Image (cartoon, rainbow, N blue to C red):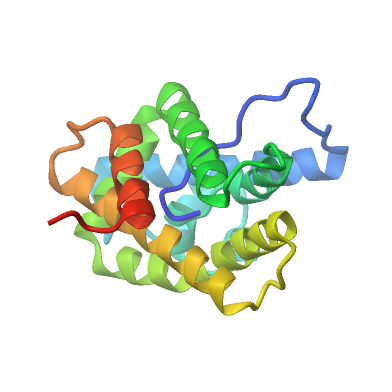
Amino acid sequence: MAASASPPPDDEQQPRLGLRERKKLKTRVAIREATYRLIAEQGYEATTVEQIAAAAEVSPSTVFRYFPTKEDIVLTDEFDPVMEAEIRARPADEPPLESVRAVLRHAVETTLADDPEEFAQRSELMLEIPAVRARMTETMAETSLMLSRAVAARTGREERDLEVLVFTASVLAALREVTIYWAEHGQKDDLAVLIDRALDSLKGGLAL
């Protein structure tokens, strides 16, 4: 997801990752941490994939295997699969918009509690770097598929139903605008409250 968030901590309800998956996750996290550290030190444009690979102690080909572009390192996280599962697990009689609201709030609150600096830096890059913002729009298609699957499963509709597609696109567009708005205003507002406001506007329309 583009405003995306880090996965919630493991607990008894979270599936345990196998050794191979844990190693992949560790590598992805190392690459991201190295990227953010280098960007903070020398700026986005001056940071190269070769430098990122060296700092993460992997080869450049490994970086590209996990992240096709430098922008993807900034934008990609591990939360989408978790979010899909959490939406599916919400109460059966809960409206889809409220299910999405609850899961997004959890994602934001978890991320701001666990790694606020990385989340803030990511939002700033979305605002300041045109290539990052453009890539965010491109990669939303993958998040859209995830969200469509979850919403379709909850509503008994097909993933490609018009109503499912419109709902999904609206939620993701709202999340994108909230992230940009939050960054533009110095990250001073409560992001969870902004998400609530945005989703309320989808639910009730724009009051005159």
Residue 199 is at least partly visible in this image: yes
Residue 57 is at least partly visible in this image: no
Of the pair 205 and 120, the residue shown nearer to us: 205
From the viewer's perspective, is 124 left or right of 29? Answer: left
From the viewer's perspective, is 64 left or right of 126? Answer: right
The residue shown at (71%, 46%) is 88
> Does residue 152 sit above or below 79 in this rendering?
below
Q: Position of residue 121 (x, y in %)?
A: 30, 41
The residue shown at (40%, 28%) is 112
> Does residue 185 sit above or below 143 in this rendering?
above
The residue shown at (57%, 40%) is 30
From the viewer's perspective, is 197 left or right of 207? Answer: right
* Residue 143 lies in quadrant: bottom right
Q: Position of residue 194 (x, y in %)?
A: 28, 40
* Residue 127 lies in quadrant: bottom left
Of the pair 82 and 19, the residue shown nearer to us: 82
Q: Position of residue 188 (x, y in %)?
A: 17, 31
Q: Position of residue 134 (x, y in %)?
A: 34, 72
The residue shown at (39%, 43%) is 36
Of the pair 112 and 151, the residue shown nearer to us: 151
Looking at the rendered structure, the number of numbered marks drawn on it comes to: 0
Query: Quarter of the image containing the C terminus?
Result: bottom left
